[in-house]
Image (spheres, grey):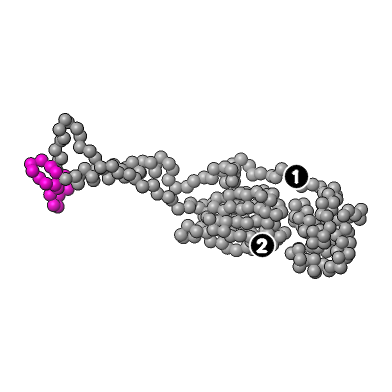
Amino acid sequence: MRSDAGVGAALAAARGTRGMSIAELSERTRIRATLITQMENEDFTGCGGVVYARGHIRSIARMLEIDPEPLIADYDRVHGRVPEAPVLLPREFDPLIAGGRPRRQGFTRMPAVAISLASVCVLVGLAVLLAPGGSGGSGGVASGTTAAATAPPLQGGAAPAQPATTALPTTPPPVGVNVLVAVRGDPSWLEVRDESARVLLQQILQPGDSRTVTATRSMEIKIGNAGAVDMSCNGRNLGSSGNAGQVVTVRVGLGTSGDCTVGGAVPR
């Protein structure tokens, strides 16, 4: 459906044909009634940007059972198309986005290997000290002493076999706050800042896109289309934080046991 009078006029005409009031349309689409009124008057400034305006047009058109694509084409022709490539962060923030390697905190690989080798050496030394047998007919280590009897050498000069020891690997708990955001349905704009207000992510994500962001203690996540974004923090599924087209701010932090604490979704 295309109208030379404008996108808003076409939506208003379709609504009138369906015999639906603005209040009814608002309740079914979850779009504010005042915003629908502005859109029908060709005022799209309250949508929050081109991406959200297109999403609102599509939602209203589908509810009114008309083809949204010609209306979106008319909107793009008047108000300008959305840039095809999203705006990415500078290179120094790439490690904090999925596809890069996030910074690890705590022990690095080489100190961990050194600690494992030291543990093996201690276990081998204890095994040697506690080995049975000794010179002068002693049957073992004297009670209350720290020195061990020397074991007799084997025939042929072979050294006595030492017990094999294996250091068991350990799995460290999650470090910091790790948040996975995934977009479905419609595009959404995201801005993520850490506890020092440093920008970790600022990008428009398309349906099917996902990003992983890491902070030391906490982060603040602003979502431009809350109904289209699902989140999880340190493996805990947080789900959706709002409705379609709603702009919210979510604050997550690191709990004492390593799990995530959620401050809740705060509408803007």
- Between residue 164 and residue 243, name the one nearer to us: 164
Q: Nearer the viewer, residue 151 or 48?
A: 151
Task: Looking at this view, name the residue that lies furthest to the right.
Answer: 4
Do labels 2 and 1 touch, CB within 8 Å?
no
Q: Is residue 142 magenta?
A: yes
x, y percentage for residue 26? 78, 66
Image point (67%, 54%), residue name? 184
Q: Quadrant of residue 24?
A: bottom right
Range of magenta residues: 133-148
What SS does tag 2 mark? Answer: loop
167 lies left or right of 98: left
| Disc 2: CA contacts within 10 A as few (<14), some (14-19) or many (>=20) | many
Q: Which mark is residue 83?
A: 1
Q: Position of residue 40 (x, y in %)?
A: 85, 61
Location of residue 149 with respect to 61 vertically, above or below: above
The residue at the point 78 percent across, 53 percent down is: 54
Q: Nearer the viewer, residue 95 or 152?
A: 152
Q: Which badge, 2 or 1, is on the more N-terminal residue?
A: 1
Task: Provide the secondary structure element on which disc 1 rests.
Answer: loop
Name the amino acid type tagged 1: Pro
Say what amino acid the circle numbered 2 marks.
Gly
Q: Which mark is residue 242?
A: 2
* Frontmost residue, 175 versus 181: 181
Do we see residue 213 in this rendering?
Answer: yes
Residue 12: image tag: none
User: What is the residue that sits farthest to the top in this orientation?
Assistant: 156
The answer to whether one can see residue 122 in this image is no
